[in-house]
Image (tube, coloured by chain):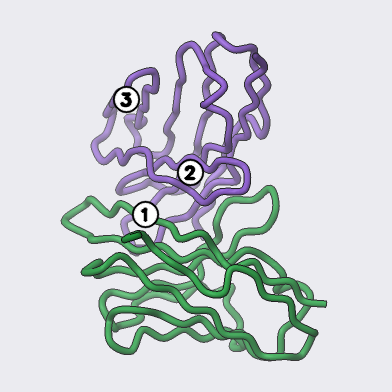
Amino acid sequence: DTGVSQDPRHKITKRGQNVTFRCDPISEHNRLYWYRQTLGQGPEFLTYFQNEAQLEKSRLLSDRFSAERPKGSFSTLEIQRTEQGDSAMYLCASSLASGDLDTQYFGPGTRLTVL
Amino acid sequence: GQQVMQIPQYQHVQEGEDFTTYCNSSTTLSNIQWYKQRPGGHPVFLIQLVKSGEVKKQKRLTFQFGEAKKNSSLHITATQTTDVGTYFCAGRNNYGQNFVFGPGTRLSVLP
């Protein structure tokens, strides 16, 4: 399968614990996006990378969230001191941006439940 | 900040009827994308519109981008049960590279 993969698919944690999610984009895609989606809502932008550089980060993202893409390939999203409000589906998408065209291919997501 | 709205929130149609969802942005967009998300699935890219007034067709789906580049629509002719899902628009403004997604329109098709 050469699509976007995410690990784990499900994560249940207790409030206050740290969690880390991984995203493996489609090979050679230069852009990688992280989104959060709650039930009945559209994906909410969290942050995005162009190769290994983190170029944008949502103002809604608290300091408890951090993301890395160290070698411009896979990316990790860490949430520290989780809160119940962090419960959501975390989606990763990658694209091979060319001019205006920026087709995002989404992964299956990691569903986080904070107890 | 930029806001993207979609109406209606839900739409129930009989198979064979037409369906339209509308997307409106609070700011002028450089381009807009449409995605479809099946229940339990992830968003899947449908199309991107860039030019003012642009119209694109994919079989039974017709996409339009408004002249002012602040609104867009998706029209499905003669819906089928395979069209079931939530349709999202996602707009990118002239100042950044991120996309702002609308809340989506959830389509149900009754056989």
Residue drawn at (68%, 48%), measured in percent from left and top? A40
Distance CA(mark 3)–CA(mark 1): 25 Å
Q: Are marks 3 and 2 in contact (CB under 8 Å)?
A: no
Q: Earlier in the sequence, mark 2 or mark 1?
A: 2
Chain identity of mark 2: B
Q: Residue furthest right?
A: A115
Determine whether, in the image, residue B16 is placed left or right of residue A18: left
* Local SS, label 3: strand
Q: Is residue B39 above or below residue B82?
A: below
Q: Determine if marks 3 and 2 fall on one subunit.
A: yes
Q: Position of residue B90 (x, y in %)?
A: 44, 48
Residue drawn at (27%, 81%), measured in percent from left and top? A72
* Local SS, label 2: strand
Q: Position of residue A62 (x, y in %)?
A: 61, 82
Q: Position of residue B95 (x, y in %)?
A: 33, 62
Q: Disc 1 designates what residue? A: B93
Count numbered badges in the picture: 3
Chain letter, green: A
Chain identity of mark 3: B
Q: Disc 2 designates what residue? A: B25
Residue drawn at (76%, 90%), measured in percent from left and top? A16
The amino acid beneath tag 2 is Ser
The amino acid beneath tag 3 is Gln
Q: Nearer the viewer, mark 3 or mark 2?
A: 3
Q: Which mark is residue B58?
A: 3
Q: Is residue B37 above or below residue B17?
A: below
Q: Position of residue A73 (x, y in %)?
A: 30, 79
Q: Are marks 2 and 1 in contact (CB under 8 Å)?
A: yes
Q: Is residue B94 above or below residue A47?
A: above
Chain letter, purple: B
Give residue A37's quadrant in the image.
bottom right
The amino acid beneath tag 1 is Asn
